[in-house]
Image (spheres, helix red, strand yellow):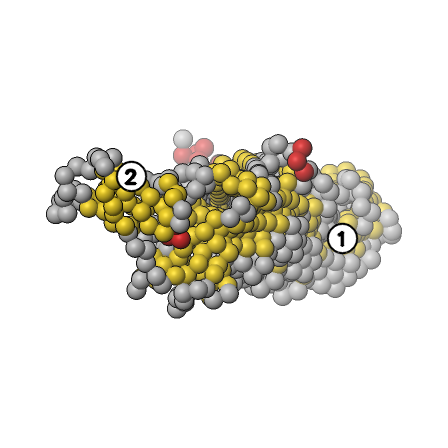
Amino acid sequence: MNNNKQILTVLALLALSGSVAHATDYTWRGGTPASWSVASNWEPTGVPGPNDSAVINRYVSLGGNITVSNLTLTTGGGLQNGNLTVLGTMNWLAGEISTASLTIPSGGTLNLSGSELKDFHLASFTNSGTVLWTGTGALSLMGTPIVSDGTWDLQTDASLLWWWGDASTWFRNHGVVRKTAGTGTNTIGLPFHNHGTMEVQSGTVLFNGGGNGTGLFQAQTNATVDFGSRGYTDAGGLRLTGAGLHRWTGGTITLNGPAEADQVEWTGAILAGTNSLRGTVTWTSGTINGAVSVASNAVLQVSGATEKGLNSGVLTNQGLVRWGGTGPLKFLAGAVANAAGGTMEIVDDLSFINWWPNGQFYNAGLVRKTAGSGTNSFTVAFHNTGTVEVQSGTVAIGGGGTGTGVFHAATNAALRFTGEYTLAGAVDAQNLEWAVSSLRGTAVVSGTVLWTSGVIGSGAAITFASNAVVTLSGAGTKGMHTSVLTNLGLIRWASPGTLNLLGSPIVNRGVFEIQNDELLQRGWGAADQQTWFLNTGLVRKIAGAGTSIFGLPFRNHGVVDVRAGTVRFSDSYTQTAGALCLRLNGATDCARLCFDGNLPLAGSSLTVALAEGFMPTPGSRFDLLSFGSRTGDFAVMNGLDLGNDWWLDARYSSTNLTLLTRGDLPELSIQQAAPGVVVSWPVGFSTFKLTSSTNLTATNAWTLIPPPYETYGPNFQFIEPAPAGSTFYRLRRP
């Protein structure tokens, strides 16, 4: 047993001593090209083997599978026609490898050094060890693939060139490619397929040949990974990490799946695929062709003066998109979708342009303009089911769309609609400006709205809620076309120009306030039976010394209050228990109502108010109402008693109601006329009402004796056939 161990030990020592003894350093001395396997081509004579080192300075034909321990390829040298494996260290200073393969196994090292160009020509290179690139000379590949599951250490700014641009040249990394030195740029000009790790610790690595993969790209502080002119295709789960910068500068970046990105600068590439961005991406130029989603924890920062594009792509935001810079976003059949919970913040005055007629912008989250004193124009269709908030400048929506959400603009900011727009559902507005050609839909609008031009279009049914304040201003044409407007809030009609209604009724249950001397009419004339104004609220004229005209059927079941100028009803006027209010502003100035047709007064009331600081004096006269004809009298007249024994005497003619200020009082005459009494007073006091009482100490002692009263000569008279006991009579002033 011991003898066997001794024999094995001796054999092992012999083998070891033989290996050391036969390691030889060879230098090529043969011609160009000549065979590796010819011993006379080497100095010393022999053929390098797995334990040997070789120095080559001319072209050598491998002629088969060659393995050496170490090899140096220097100026004038080249390897051809075979397969070379270097187990230890290969120093490549210059020369080329053509029609041959090179393998660096695990534990081996390839040193690329020197300033001279090195060529792979119709060759292949497999690295499972380490490539240490320190020289400034470029490495050029023609028809040569590289497969590496080892390590590449770039300690230089030299370039990897794609000489022919052929499909058989590429770099597939399953290991680690790392740039550890050099503050400049390494250009990798061939397709780079990364399934391992690409790490840039210093300077920039520029990928100008495209590529694909699932691997990791890492850029450390002050370092950059630049996907250049040919872009990159993610095979699923691309990760761009580190405190440094990743650039998408050209070509097409195709992302298929979630893409983790700590810091990305997007400066010109086309972004394609179906993907989700996670991290921070800065977009200064480029185009979206795919389905790009910004994850809930991601930030897409848009900046710069260069235009960006949405071709057939969709940008969906679940995180934060910050729109900055002045470069427009052009939509070519593309769409932006801001999801519920997503925020799109506008910090500059860029525009969203409909370059092709299918561009869409959908907001279910928050779109907020926080900076920029100018205007953001949306000429794409804008659909809002979330919140649009303008804190600065103006947002102008002019490409149509639908709105069911909240529209809000702060003081000194504006949200303007131009073009055609459709509202639906409950719409909360604040400082909203309508300059639409046509507003459509069925909606309840609350908040503040400025209507500067446009019509409420065909089929629309718009309701202004009780908290709505809508101001019609500006010289733009306004009107309604086969639509319905219901007002529960406040409408201020302040704009110049006619308000035309075509087959469109207005129902006012709130306040319709007139601040001009303009015409509201049915534009199709008397044949239009669908246009009318129904008032069950308050119609009030507060400004304009001239005449405001309602040129359409007016149905009053509420209050018409004229405080300035004249309101004229040139079409039919009907009222049931309606109220008319007029103000006396001065000795020769009173508000007036004119009715071209018949004025029905039965069951209605009149209230006369005095402007602050004004008191009419006896003898002053006020022509309040004019009418083509009238039926009935006011059931109640309020405000005719001026106090201090002054009062307003209401006098009817066939076409007018006039108030005469008086300071005298009527004398009431009571005479017996068997079997009763006759109570009489002058007809000049026609607005006084007769009352009677049989118990002066009782609550509500006086009972109205309603008109009409008989006229007898110069007096009104009332005959009481059989007074009950002691009956007292008096006249009550209006």
- Total marks drawn? 2
On the image, the x and y values in percent for residue 39 come to: 79, 47
Q: Mark 2 Cα within 10 Å, few/some/many (few <14, many 20+)?
A: some
Relative to 145, 657 lies left or right: left
On the image, the x and y values in percent for residue 488 come to: 45, 43
**In the orientation shown, which residue stands out farthest toward the bottom?**
613
On the image, the x and y values in percent for residue 125 come to: 70, 44
Relative to 708, 35 lies left or right: right
Secondary structure state at the residue bearing disc 1: strand
Which residue is depicted at the point 47% across and 61% down? 621
Amino acid type of the residue that numbered disc 1 sits on in the rendered structure: Leu
Secondary structure state at the residue bearing disc 2: strand
Name the image quarter holding residue 276.
Answer: top right
State the residue in front, 150 or 442. Answer: 442
The residue beneath circle 2 is 719
Q: Which of marks 2 and 1 is nearer the N terminus?
A: 1
State the residue in front, 693 or 642. Answer: 693
The residue beneath circle 1 is 161
Amino acid type of the residue that numbered disc 2 sits on in the rendered structure: Ile
* Observer able to see residue 131: no
**In the orientation shown, which residue stands out farthest toward the left?**
697
Q: Relative to 700, is 57 above or below?
A: below
Q: Relative to 451, is 439 above or below?
A: above
On the image, the x and y values in percent for residue 75 come to: 79, 60
State the residue in front, 687 or 410. Answer: 687
Which residue is depicted at the point 38% across and 44% down? 712
Separation of residues labelled 2 and 1 (CA atoms): 124 Å
State the residue in front, 533 or 66. Answer: 533
Which residue is depicted at the point 22% across and 35% down? 675
* Discs 2, 1 touching: Cβ within 8 Å: no
